[in-house]
Image (cartoon, coloured by chain):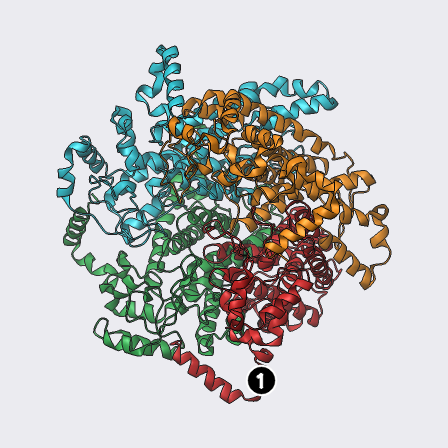
Chain colours: A orange, B red, C green, D cyan
């Protein structure tokens, strides 16, 4: 239900920048299958001192992280580590709490999918109006849910080692020389991740009847308008959050879902959203997949019903995905993404630009032109 | 439900030929997991000017694409880019509209599989004559359909970034500095892709009874002869279209299904054709898989019925796959494939050769001999 | 339902040895994703002539293959190509008919799994004694069967391009400049593969009742003793045949299931054997998986029934897998494997050694000692 | 149902350290797809003699292994091979019996999952209280179980060649020149693995009723408290055992599930634990996934029942996973893991430290500081 260290390394701590960064004191570089040539331990405090001016926050950061029981060096990419925006106070918090944040969100994703699958199967059991006429899933769907939850949780946790389970952290402390002082904060983060995932499931109402559409999604009749919106919102937020995790090469630990792995991981993600959160509204989460076919079904004569169904529900799959995806993306960027190209990684999350919109747009376009993007 | 940029790159634009091509002005080369050494931005307009004579259409093309809101440089392979046949007017259209075409067909595949699965499950619910006696799928089949649709849609879209969802494009514009001017044409292409996928589903008739054969495929009794033909035709066209996409190394973006990934992707493709389009005729789509066993079942004594069943349906799985595969292949080559080895990439789609068949054959054989193919 | 050429290459012919082999006239080397640096066409007939003495059969072989419509050069590994045992008459047949053999067995595997799944689902529909109480599979199982069949068929066909479908060969001839003269022999091989796969399905008896065991496998009551044996034999033969194909690095074409892919491919293989051939005897195919638990279940008090059940069926999962695996292995080695380390690739399939067993054993041990294996 | 040699190598024996180790006499290095440049046979006994002092146990070890019918050289990593702790008597046993241990545990995992799936499906058939209302799985679940069992068994067996099936070993002896003297000990280990896996299944009680929870796991009512504990214990032990196998780069043979493969393998592992062992307690195996949501469900008003259900079962998913994971980790480290960073690989399994806890802790912290881990 999680990931442990590659053997030979007592700590899964992956200080990716350690090769070139003279500040990367005492770190154990990532040992992936393809490039494990630099698995040597760096243990020279002098080297760190000599480059003291390079990044003045390092020493404070290391003290903070040491007090939390974490590895002195946060596992973030060297280029991110040195980037200008990392001097902002929130960026420092994010680096100091990198592994706990990762374990928290990883466990949250795990429990969201797992409990989501259980809830959907149990509450929809025997529902005659379900596609196929017998509820939204069976026992096997729950296994899909937990399997997917673990897989996607590992992708999200990435850099923390992706334990996601206190018993695994514990076993590594006992058997594989993982420092015991890591245990408390990992346990706390994992516990809180599971705790917080609860409310997501609360959105599932206990009504036992549902309908589903072919061309586009129709909500369950018991769903209120705000419930409909929230369902789409949650599913879209999870979609965007996990996609950003999958594509974040600086939060991979030893696991990678980029390149050839991405489409396969997307299959599991979409399957999982359907198997775990799809009951109520049919998980539209995409204007192109819902509004396009809906218009076509109207064009070929399905009548006014395609718009009025579900209390004029049709606008929800148009609006909610935009809100949900944006929220999921913000969540990921605020807590986990460290790269310089995110708006959330600007001081004050880029909100300052709202005070001077025209100038901000001009600057952006100017920069895009310089980069040849337009 | 789609793919976004690899972090660190504000645009997923993958100008693959940018390394060696002095014309590749201001492009951001593909950063894959294995070789991201050349992620530097090229921003020197002088370099572009100096090689002006190399390809005279570049400047026009860049203006056209800029007006459409697209990246000035189309993401096609350098060798394709320079190939002789790209001077043809349709090739220019195809390059100018590369990403919209990719998003259009990617979203179309996504919706075809997704809505196909929904339609099949809903319309066949409770059908006693189905294999297993209870319809052609259940709620989980729909999750398979959408998961597969996204996966295969990403493979088809490839070079465009494979967003497939306006909400994802939107979130990347807000958070990750994707230029806003990309948004409208991506939205339009995605919307149209979903819109057009509708008629494919219309081929599903609302009759609730079906039979299926063991040795070979038998059509549903409500299927007319033209309906039978069209069903096989559509499934075969999708088969060939996606196979050509999977094998098109010049339309991969960051995703690849060639080499070791191909058989796995084929599993998902065939599973998906069955789960989403297999209801009516049992998706023969292969003479060898249908006519061979049919002949054998006749030989071992199954009687004249193997031929007369379904109103002498037996010839359809022989003829329709050839027509469908050819149509799917043409569709892919006309809109997405840029390589020099396709007949569709000859001026006038190679139709000129029909006026001089003998000479064309001679030339072809001559060329094959020179290449040692025969 | 098959594989096509990588774009840019008019023929999927993969003459693996072409880099070092001066005989590799006019071949198009394998262009895989990772090493496509030598995609240049070799077209110099002089180079071939100069190394004429190196392999004297080449010229005859090329004529034979040319007459069959095949690429002049057979796609087998250079080291295999030059190996001593390839001078044997059967080795020459195997090389001359390499692609047809590959397409034949690939299509056979495809149809065996696909039709096996259909047969199992249809014939066992509603069977109350099935695990779960409702037959051995449903419509989705059939999609698994065909998906798996295509995937494993591609692995088996490998070097031939793995078309497996005449409509795909046809489309490549029309659109992608595959020489038309390839079409007839590919069509014939594919058709025969589907034709021959029929009898495998015939082993499924039409009886609708079955029981199944927990600790070990018990046959369906309608199964005769020879039927039981044959079922286990067929499943074991398919198991060994496909494993040998998966591990055959010289028959991969562009696809590979070795290394990290092997366990995943094995999951699909075992799943497929269960989903397509598992109905009658519960697919023991393994002494360790059947006899060990059976003995344990006897030890803990399950009584004499564990032996007498099914008419003292217990010996069949002990004996049949050995016979079946051996048969499957022989089949693969005789028709598809070209490596020097197979007994089947010795002149007269190594049967000569039966006349002089003692000397043969001595030689074998001697050789093993020299290689440090014992 | 297992793995065989890569063609061209008569023995799958993978002496990974053979490149640099002058002691690596007569070994056949691993030939993976990517680096098969050194497939030459080393057969010089002189080279071994010259480095006789380097490791004095080699000669004894080779005699012992030779008598057992095994390859003279055990397939363990060079760095592990030379590590100090390998002089301990148990380390010698582990190296001498490396392949039998691997085959034993690999077959045990295979049968545990396979028979677990069968038991769960058969015993829970028709259970109305199951999620979905119709038992814990169907015939397809059994195919998942066996497929997963083989996949995970191959990962566990790794270095032994992962035959897992006497019929496959047999076929390789007949056809592919695997020395016959390997056969008996492989057969014995495989048989015993299947034999021992029986009791694991015995934990499944024959009662046909069950309930399941949404937010957290509730045990089946027929489960005694010790049965509940044992169920969670077994599932957690399997979890940790397989995770350690997946991450053990020195026990991979030609198969690897590290890096990008790890999350996918974890999906299969968790899916399999649910599909094969999840019936009774709902496989919590994780405090964070059970206690967190349980607390939340109490907080939002689910009442005292969340604690008292199942006879105050709630503490079991908190305690049992720690015990089970630890046991599974110990099992793996004692029998299969050879790396220096495991407590189990210290003389007397590190138990000596219990006599001097304070000093042991000091030493450990000291070492961690030196390595920069704290």
Using the image as rendered, state which of residue D36 and residue D192 is in the foreground.
D36
Residue D165: x and y in percent read 37, 43
Residue at mark 1: chain: B
Residue B352: x and y in percent read 58, 84
The answer, for residue B243, to whether it is visible in the render is no
Left or right, C153 with reference to D301: left
Mark 1 residue element: helix
Q: Image height check: is C20 above or below A88?
A: below
Residue that appears at 37% across and 78% down: C66
Using the image as rendered, state which of residue C160 and residue A21 is in the foreground.
A21
User: Quick one: label 1, few (<14), some, or many (20+) residues within 10 Å?
Assistant: few
Q: Image height check: is C222 above or below A127?
A: below
Using the image as rendered, state which of residue A41 and residue C45 is in the foreground.
A41
Residue that appears at 45% across and 34% down: D242
Residue B360: x and y in percent read 50, 85
The answer, for residue C105, to whether it is visible in the render is yes
Residue linked to disc 1:
B352
Left or right, B2 with reference to B244: right
């Amino acid at each position: 239900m999680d990931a442990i260290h590659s053997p030979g390394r007592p700590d899964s701590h992956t200080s990716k920048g350690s090769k070139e960064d003279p500040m990367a004191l005492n770190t154990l570089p990532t040992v992936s299958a393809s490039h494990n040539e630099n698995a040597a331990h760096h243990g020279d405090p002098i080297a760190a001192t000599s480059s003291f001016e390079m990044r003045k926050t390092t020493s404070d950061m290391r003290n903070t992280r040491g007090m939390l029981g974490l590895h002195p060096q946060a596992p973030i990419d060297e280029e991110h580590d040195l980037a200008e925006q990392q001097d902002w106070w929130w960026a420092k918090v994010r680096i100091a709490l990198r592994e706990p944040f990762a374990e928290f969100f990883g466990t949250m994703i795990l429990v969201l999918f797992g409990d989501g699958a259980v809830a959907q199967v149990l509450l929809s059991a025997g529902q005659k109006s379900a596609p196929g006429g017998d509820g939204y899933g069976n026992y096997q769907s729950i296994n899909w849910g937990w399997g997917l939850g673990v897989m996607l949780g590992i992708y999200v946790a990435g850099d923390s080692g992706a334990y996601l389970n206190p018993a695994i952290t514990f076993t590594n402390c006992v058997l594989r020389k993982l420092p015991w002082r890591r245990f408390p904060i990992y346990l706390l983060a994992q516990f809180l991740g599971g705790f917080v995932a609860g409310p997501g499931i609360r959105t599932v109402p206990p009504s036992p009847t549902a309908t589903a559409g072919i061309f586009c999604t129709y909500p369950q009749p018991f769903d209120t308008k705000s419930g409909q919106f929230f369902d789409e919102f949650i599913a879209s937020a999870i979609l965007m959050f996990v996609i950003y995790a999958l594509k974040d090469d600086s939060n991979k630990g030893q696991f990678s879902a980029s390149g050839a792995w991405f489409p396969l991981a997307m299959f599991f993600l979409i399957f999982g959203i359907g198997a775990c959160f799809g009951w109520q509204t049919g998980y539209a989460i995409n204007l192109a997949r819902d509004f396009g076919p809906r218009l076509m079904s109207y064009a070929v004569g399905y009548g006014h019903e395609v718009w009025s169904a579900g209390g004029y529900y049709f606008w929800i799959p148009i609006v909610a995905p935009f809100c949900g995806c944006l929220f999921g993306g913000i969540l990921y960027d605020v807590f986990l993404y460290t790269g310089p190209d995110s708006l959330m990684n600007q001081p004050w999350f880029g909100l300052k630009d709202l005070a001077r919109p025209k100038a901000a747009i001009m600057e952006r376009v100017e920069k895009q032109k310089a980069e040849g993007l337009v």
